Image (tube, grey):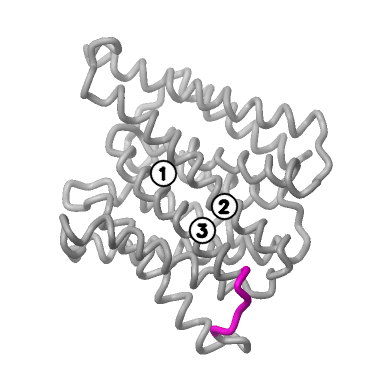
Amino acid sequence: MLAALAGFGMLGIFHKVADHPGCRPKMIALSLLGCGGILTLFYTLLFEPKGLHFPREAWAIGALGGAFSGLALLLFQTGLRYGKISTSWLIINLSMSVPISLSIFLFGEKPNVAKGLGVVLVFAAILMMWWDKKIDLESSGTDLAEAGSANKSRWLPLMLLAFFCNGLGASSQKLLVEAGAGDYTWQFYVALYWSGFMLMSLLSFRHEGWPNGRELATGMVMAVSSVAGNVALTLALAYHVPGSIAFPVGNGGSLTLVVLAGVLFFHEKVHRVGIAGIVCGIGAILVLLLA
């Protein structure tokens, strides 16, 4: 769980590093997924006793998870151009409410009042993040009703789409374990990263060519962080850590690292309502963890 927290924390910080004029969102997603695919493929071939022999369930679930994860990466990196990492990363991490809900309703994990409260706090935090963005626009002299093609109509829809796609992608980890294929973690991630890479290739090569040096280097660091976090989280699930605990710690625990980096290193200004949203989001994570 600590390895998952550290991996996802570094991934969030480097998402902000990738928010640079020399980095295109599609190329960042392509580089991350491609490097992740190479890392998982080499490890599986060299160190996994089962190699690339794995059941159809692992391939199918991994391919589906890769498609959703690739779309989430693209949507998030694009939306980050219109918002702040401290608030955007909160929304993407709160997408753990999707696999938590599926763990309760689809896989029969026992629900309780605390888990319900946690999910309510998730959506309250998202509302506060939208309000923080509204204050940003108004303080810069941009009226929310007239912003039109400016930031106001872009950040929240992109982040909400990334929220649901990332949540569905993360749910594939729980689905893998429930399908009895938890012993094929590395093989699952081979399918996930390569299917995401192929999807991004179809969306990118025709119009944008190949990644440049900055995009490739940034994507490589992000891939290492992503692989470490995802594999550690799935192994925790395989060791029978409940999904309602694993997802808050692994995905949500990285939030503090990313928020601190946004404020201290990237000098992002967070308004009072944004701070309240971050506190509410952290509260949601803690409530779900304690539940």
Query: Mark 1 to mark 3: distance in Å?
Result: 32 Å
**Image point (17%, 59%), residue name:** 206
> What residue is disc 3 on?
64
Q: Quadrant of the C terminus?
A: top right
Q: Quadrant of residue 159?
A: top left
Task: Tell me the number on the disc at residue 221.
Answer: none
Q: Within 10 angstroms of label 3, few (less than 14), some, or many (20 or more) residues?
A: some
Q: Within 10 angstroms of label 2, few (less than 14), some, or many (20 or more) residues?
A: many
Kind of residue sitting beneath label 1: Ala
**Image point (34%, 30%), residue name:** 155
In terms of depth relative to the viewer, which is nearer, 167 or 254? 167
Does label 3 or label 2 sit earlier along the sequence? 3
Q: Quadrant of residue 47?
A: bottom right
Counting from the top left corner in percent of width and height, residue 35 is at 36, 70
**Image point (80%, 28%), residue name:** 113
* Span highlighted in magenta in the image: 52-57
Task: Tell me the number on the disc at residue 261.
Answer: 1
Label 3: element kind: helix
Counting from the top left corner in percent of width and height, residue 172 is at 59, 56
> What residue is disc 2 on?
170
Kind of residue sitting beneath label 3: Leu
The answer to whether 129 appears left or right of 51 in the picture is left
The answer to whether 43 appears left or right of 253 in the picture is left
Query: Mark 1 to mark 2: distance in Å?
Result: 24 Å
Label 2: element kind: helix
Counting from the top left corner in percent of width and height, residue 182 is at 69, 69
**Image point (51%, 27%), residue name:** 126
Does label 1 or label 3 sit earlier along the sequence? 3
